[in-house]
Image (spheres, helix red, strand yellow):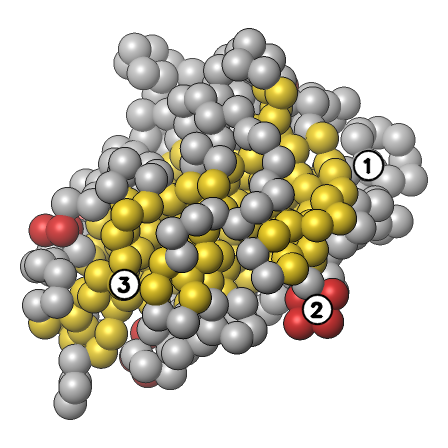
Amino acid sequence: MQSLLLPGLIALGAAQATMAAAAPGAAQTSDQASFRVVTVTGGLEFPWSLAFLPDGDMLITEKPGRLRRWHQGKLLPGPVAGVPPVVFKDDGGLMDVVLHPDFAANHWIYLCFGHGTMERNALRVVRARLADDTLEDTQVIIDADNFNKDGSHLGCRMMFDRDGHLFVTSGDRFDFRNEAQNLTNLYGKVLRLNADGTIPTDNPFARSGAGRPEIWSSGHRNPQGAALHPDTGHVWTHEHGPQGGDEINTPRSGGNYGWPKATFGIDYDDSVISDFNELPGMEQPVWYWRPSIAPSGMAFYTGSAFPKWQGDLFVGAMKATCLVRLELDGERVQHEERLLLDLGERIRDVRNGPDGFLYLLTDSEQGRLLRLEPVSGS
């Protein structure tokens, strides 16, 4: 597998995947660190997202519609009460969870999920107050109009920027890829909202009426990773391509990121989607993969446990069953390394822990929460 950096190409030898043995608990060696993989807990059914609470507890979403809590060193047997009904179908279900930036004071959490019926569903974001193990005061933040009959390509990653704006990724729903270029709907877009769901007045189309006011950027396929660059404060996202063409982007106000008019991928029947990798007026990705790795979850490492990983970008890979580490120079990718290949797990989410370790969720009916810890003396 080869990764490509735009506008030029990194030679295959420089970008070749680095394989690291990955038996849980065994010491592993990467380019810049030695670590071991620890299973924190199993017993998770298709876990999708992880959020750390200020007291050290964790919230974990399970795609069938449960919000689980890790409390004082153990996974509580029952789910958090008050989670809204979700449509668990295909790729969809209960997906992302994030905390309000001032959660310690207001206790707001945000959930993104498939909403509607088995025959007609779309993305919904709600917020609710977490009171012990119950959600209260639930409010709808946004109902997207990206309807489809199945659960594919919802997007559904969320993050807050430094100014308290909520970013939400919305997928093209697979059957409606051309709508990613249509500014009158929310298929294949990155959305930007205030924390209460109102529209920021400086959104690119908030005043002009040239597009939906929620839209921040367009031309996306199925974005399922979002993270804030620790130095620049810029939003980074990644998205699934078809066969090839998985991308990392840095969505800017009003930017068009090409899908499906410009792509590095081909369709699943090997037919050509577009003759163009780039087009005037459309932004190029920071990085792309061909063939696909099926990226999900993303985090810039900001902890202290792995000093040589500081500022590196970590991406979960489901098809490639590994954890991707990208070394950056500013906002350019310089090197790729692939970790945990021998583990054979689909990595769904990647998070920084308050203890300085990296936490991962594996995507399966018997999903696990994993932690990467440094090997003593490394």
Q: Is residue 281 above or below residue 298?
A: above
Residue at 53%, 67% (x, y): give it.
53
Identify the image quadrant of residue 334.
Answer: bottom left
- Residue 36 horizontal/vertical position (percent): 16, 70
- Residue 188 horizontal/vertical position (percent): 59, 29
Q: What is the three-letter code of the residue carrying label 1?
A: Pro
Q: Is residue 144 visible?
A: yes
Q: Is residue 171 above or below residue 197?
A: above
Distance, label 1 to label 3, CA atoms, is 42 Å
* Residue at the limit of the structure toward the front, as seen here: 78
Q: Nearer the viewer, residue 175 or 91?
A: 91
Total labels: the figure holds: 3
Q: Nearer the viewer, residue 319 or 292?
A: 319
Residue at 26%, 68% (x, y): give it.
372
Q: Quadrant of the N terminus?
A: top left
Query: Is residue 306 shown left or right of residue 12?
Result: right
Distance, label 3 to label 2, CA atoms, is 27 Å
- Residue 59 horizontal/vertical position (percent): 48, 57
Q: Quadrant of the C terminus?
A: bottom left
- The mark nearer the N terminus, 1 or 3, is 3
| Pointer 1 residue | 213
Distance, label 2 to label 1, CA atoms, is 25 Å
